[in-house]
Image: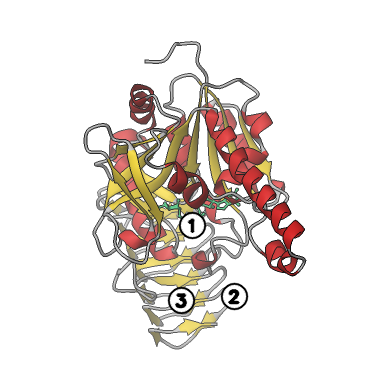
Amino acid sequence: MGSSEEKVVAVIIVGGPTKGTRFRPVSFNTPKPLFPLAGQPMVHHPISACKRIPNLAQVFLIGFYEEREFALYVSSISNELRVPMRYLKEDKPHGSAGALYYFRDLIMEDDPSHIFLLNCDVCCSFPLPAMLDAHRSYGGMGTLLVIKVSAESANQFGELVADPVTKELLHYTEKPETFVSDLINCGVYVFTPEIFSAIQDVSTHREDRTNLQRVFSFDSLHSVTRTVPADFVRLDQDILSPLAGKRKLYTYETMDFWEQIKTPGMSLKCSALYLAQFRLTSPNLLASGDGTRSPTVIGDVYVHPSAKIHPTAKIGPDVSISANVRIAAGVRILNCIILDDVEIKENAVAMHAIVGWKSSLGKWSRVQAKGDYNAKLGITILGESVTVEDEVVVINSIVLPNKTLNVSVQDEIIL
Ligand code: GDD
C-alpha cells in the first residue's frame, strides 16, 4: 500500500483528427473520443474510472484536436465529477509515449508518485485501483493491463509473454506477423515518474543516431530526415519492447470484458457492454418502462431525459437514445445508437444500426443489419441528416451525411 500522501495523476491519450479514420462516417462531425457509447462520450468511461483512483490529483486529456472541440466537455465533466481536468493540445502527433513526454512538466506539477496512461479507444471495466495495488507490490517502473484473447485475433494488438509467477513482462511484440502469444496489451498502464527518463533515452539515442549518420554520409541525410523524428516516441515499439525482460515492466491480467473501439461496428458492441456495466455501477442511468405510461423497455437501455418516446414504442435491449430524439407510436428499436435530434416516425423499425444526428426515419421504414460487429457492412450506419422516406428499407448499408433515400437499398455504401 502507498502512503496516503502520494498523489496520482491520470493521462488519457485521445489522438487527433488524422487518426480514427476507420471510425468514419460517424467521426466526420464529432471527434471520435466524444462519440457517445451508452449515452456518454467514449472518453467519459475512462474518466469516470479514474475517479475511483485513491488520491487522484488531476486528469489530463492529451490530443491534437483543437482545444475548442473539448473545452465544453472538459469543463462540464470536471465540475460534475469534481476532479481537476485539463485538455492539453499537441502542436503535432508525438506518438503515444512522446505525447506524455511533451507535457511532462505539467503532468509532474503535483509531484505525483504514479501516472496512469489510458488509451481513449478501449472499452473495459478499467480496474485501476487493483492495478495500482499490483504495481506497488511488483515494485517496477510500469504495469500493463493485459488480457487473453483468441489466437486468431491477437495479431491486431501488442502480443506479450509474462512470467506466470512474478508477472514480469518478459517479451513484447507489437502486432506481430507470426503468432507469439494470446496475451495482449490492453492500452492501460500505470507508471512511476521514471517513465519520463525511459522516453527521454529513446529520443536522445535517436538524435545521436541521426547526428552520427549525418557526419558519415551526406546521402543518408535524406533518408534519415524521412525516418521517425526524435520527438515521436511510441510506447509499444519504443519503450515496451526494449524494456521487456529487464525487471522494469509487469503485467496485471483482467478477467473482465475488454474491446478495442476502432470502427462504428465496435462502438455499437461497446455501447452494449457499457450499458451492461451500468447495471452494476450506475443503475440510475438505465431506463425502465412497461408500456403503460412510458414505452416498453427490454434489457439495458439509456434514454436522454430530453428524448420523447411514445408509450406504444418498444425499445431494447442494448439501445442508447441521445438528446432531443422523438420516437412515434409503434416504433421498434433494438441494438442501436440513436444520436441527437433524430426523428423516428410511426411504426418504423431500427435494428443493429447507428442513426446519425438530425436524421429521420419515415413511417413503416426499416433500418437494419445482421449485427456482425466485425464485418464491413455488419451494422447499418446513417450519417448526419439522412432522410429515410416512408416504407423504405435500408439493410446492411452505410449512408453518408445529407442523403435522402426514397428507394430501398441492401449491402451498399451510399456516397
Ligand atoms: N495524443 C496523442 N498523440 N495520442 C495518440 C498519438 C499521438 O501522437 N498516437 C496515438 N495516440 C492515441 C490514440 O488516439 C489511441 O487512443 C492510442 O493512442 C493508441 O493508438 P495507436 O498508437 O494507433 O495504437 P493502436 O490502438 O493500434 O494499438 C495500441 O493499443 C492497443 C490496445 O488498444 C497498442 O499499444 C497495442 O499494443 C494495444 O494492444
> Are the two marked residues, 1 and 3, in contact with CB atoms closer than 8 angstroms?
no
Q: Nearer the viewer, mark 2 or mark 3?
A: 3
Look at the image and name its color scheme. secondary structure
Residue highlighted by disc 3: 398
Mark pair 1, 3: CA separation? 21 Å
Relative height, residue 256 to residue 24 (above, below): above
Farthest residue, direction top: 4
Mark pair 2, 3: CA separation? 12 Å
The label on residue 16 is none
- Dot 3 lies on which element? strand
Relative depth, front residue between 104 and 289: 104
- Dot 1 lies on which element? loop
Give the quarter of the figure containing the C terminus: bottom right
Q: Callout 3: few (<14), some (14-19), or many (20+) C-alpha neighbours within 10 Å?
A: many
The label on residue 325 is 1
Q: Nearer the viewer, mark 1 or mark 2?
A: 2
Residue highlighted by disc 2: 402
Relative depth, front residue between 207 and 262: 207
Q: Is residue 98 left or right of residue 387?
A: right
Amino acid type, label 3: Ile
- Dot 2 lies on which element? loop
